Image (cartoon, rainbow, N blue to C red):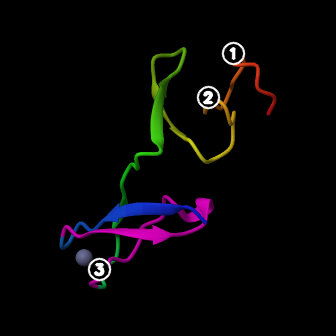
Amino acid sequence: MPIYEYQCGACDTKFELSRPVTEALQPATCPSGHDGARKLFSAFMTFSKGANGVLTAVSGGGGGCSSCGDKNCGSCGSSL
Ligand SMILES: [Zn+2]
C-alpha cells in the first residue's frame, strides 16, 4: 500500500499514512485527532503539461507507463 503525506489544517502537523490509492485524496485524521488533514504532494508526484496547457498531476506509482510515467505514453516505446 502506498504511503501518502498529509498536513493537518488545525495543528499544522505533517504525518504519513498508508492507504489504498482510492482513498488517497480523502481527508485524513491527524495524530492529534483533528479531522480534515489534506494530502500533500509527495516527491513521487510529478507534473506533466498537457496539450491544452493544463498541468496535470501524474503519480509515478499509479499506472500508466512504467518507463516514463506518462499516462498516455506513446513516445518511449514501452508497452502498457
Ligand atoms: Zn491536527
**How many residues crowd around disc 2 within 10 Å: few (fewer than 14), some, or many (20 or more)?**
few
Report how far apart the C-alphas of labels 1 and 3 lie in the structure: 45 Å
Query: x, y (%) of residue 20?
Result: 61, 66
Some atom of ligand 1 lies within 8 Å of the CB belonging to the residue at label 3: yes
Q: Can you identify the residue that label 2 sits on?
A: 68
Classify the position of ligand 1 by quadrant: top left, top right, bottom left or bottom right: bottom left
Query: x, y (%) of residue 26?
Result: 48, 64
The residue at 42%/67% (across/down) is 27
Quadrant including the C terminus: top right
Direction bottom: furthest residue: 33
- The earlier-in-sequence mark between 1 and 3 is 3
**Residue type beneath disc 3:** His
Left or right: residue 11 versus residue 46 is left
- The earlier-in-sequence mark between 1 and 2 is 2
Q: Is 7 in the magenta?
A: no
Which image quadrant for residue 72? top right
**Residue type beneath disc 1:** Ser
Residue segment shown in magenta: 12-32
Some atom of ligand 1 lies within 8 Å of the CB belonging to the residue at label 2: no
Dot 1 and dot 2 residues touching (CB under 8 Å): yes
Direction left: furthest residue: 11
**Residue type beneath disc 2:** Cys
Q: Can you identify the residue that label 3 sits on?
A: 34
